[in-house]
Image (tube, grey):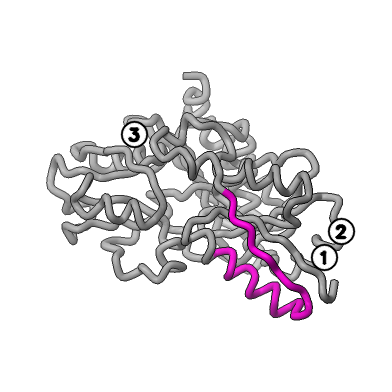
Amino acid sequence: MAGATIRVGTRGSRLALIQTELTLAILREAHPDVLFEVVTVTTQGDANQTAPLAGMGLGVFVKEIERLLEIGEIDMAVHSLKDMPTVLPEGMALGAILERADPRDALVSHLGKTLDEFPAGAKIGTSSPRRQAQIAERRPDLEIVPIRGNVDTRLRKATGEECDGTVIAVAGLDRMGLADVITEYLSPEEFVPPPGQGAMAVEIRADNKRTAELVASADHPPTTAAVSAERSFLEALGGGCQVPVGAYAEYYDSDALRLTVFMATPDGSATYRATVTGASADPARLAAQGWEKLRERGAAGLLTE
């Protein structure tokens, strides 16, 4: 593909553009003769900054980009993997999943206190049902307020403007050079991340073999196996599950994964966790085992409430 120009779709936020450039740096090194043109796209999730994300349906940060990919206006797209539904639209495929950054959540607060040190009644801002449930489980005496916006906006709102702190993904802060604002790193065993947190994905048209060969150089197989277990767990719940859900797979041996899964009621009054281990070569089986453990503990009732 020497001399070819590849059009790359992405959201226009600062973090999305940074993540796209990180991806393209890998691709440019592997394919120095290929030109990459970045195309920014406003998605539904970007355009509507007030509606709760949980009520906006699946793929609110990717649908418009996928439409351009489908009609050939772009050749590939770079997404945060956690924004992608487990079942892709017909004709779409994941061409690469990059090596994952830190998957944890972090507390950022102008109070300079850990979550356990927060005074009763303090306000924590988040629009994530999963984070709401996990915060409420740990500190039911805090007030959780909904905040939306990009990373910079949420950090500004957490300076006391709308709340005393917020919970946000470490990977995004690291990529933006903002790790110094972190007050506390939260354990992924307790604050179980969403499937794919910290990983970037390259989406392509399934029938575009040339682009598939191009982007394959960015794929990181160990990450792909781990996040496949996480996404398989979400798919086992129906893919569009609206209850708070988390899934985090980590290696404890060169070819073995430990998968922690989480479900809860939105108010955190009932929470379910399970941990299973198994071969990284069969992530779907590992996810099924995790779901079965949660079912045994009563979590299936959350899907019918």
**x%, y% of residue 165?**
25, 51
Residue that mark 3 sits on: 268
Task: Please tell me the numbered disc located at residue 213.
Answer: 1
Secondary structure found at label 3: loop
The amino acid at mark 2 is Lys
Residue 217 falls in image quadrant: bottom right
Earlier residue among tags 1 and 3: 1
Determine the residue located farthest toward the top in the rendered image: 305
Residue that mark 2 sits on: 209
Density class for disc 2 (Cα within 10 Å; few <14, some 14-19, many ≥20) is few
Give the left or right position of residue 14, taking residue 84 as reference. left
Residue 84 falls in image quadrant: top right
Name the residue located 55 percent from the left edge and 47 percent from the top edge.
Answer: 42
Secondary structure found at label 1: helix
Q: Which residue occupies the foreground of this view, 61 or 279?
A: 61
Density class for disc 1 (Cα within 10 Å; few <14, some 14-19, many ≥20) is few
The amino acid at mark 1 is Glu
Name the residue located 18 percent from the left edge and 61 percent from the top edge.
Answer: 112
- Rounded to the nearest angstrom, the CA distance separating label 3 from label 2 is 46 Å
Where 190 sits versus 254, above or below? above
Observer able to see residue 174: yes
Quadrant in the picture for the N terminus: bottom right
The amino acid at mark 3 is Gly
Please report the bounds of the magenta region as a residue range. Answer: 19-41
Residue 261 is covered by the magenta coloring: no
Secondary structure found at label 2: helix
Q: Which of marks 3 and 2 is in front?
A: 2
Q: Which residue occupies the foreground of this view, 280 or 183?
A: 183
Name the residue located 52 percent from the left edge and 52 percent from the top edge.
Answer: 248
Earlier residue among tags 3 and 2: 2
Q: Are marks 2 and 1 in contact (CB under 8 Å)?
A: yes
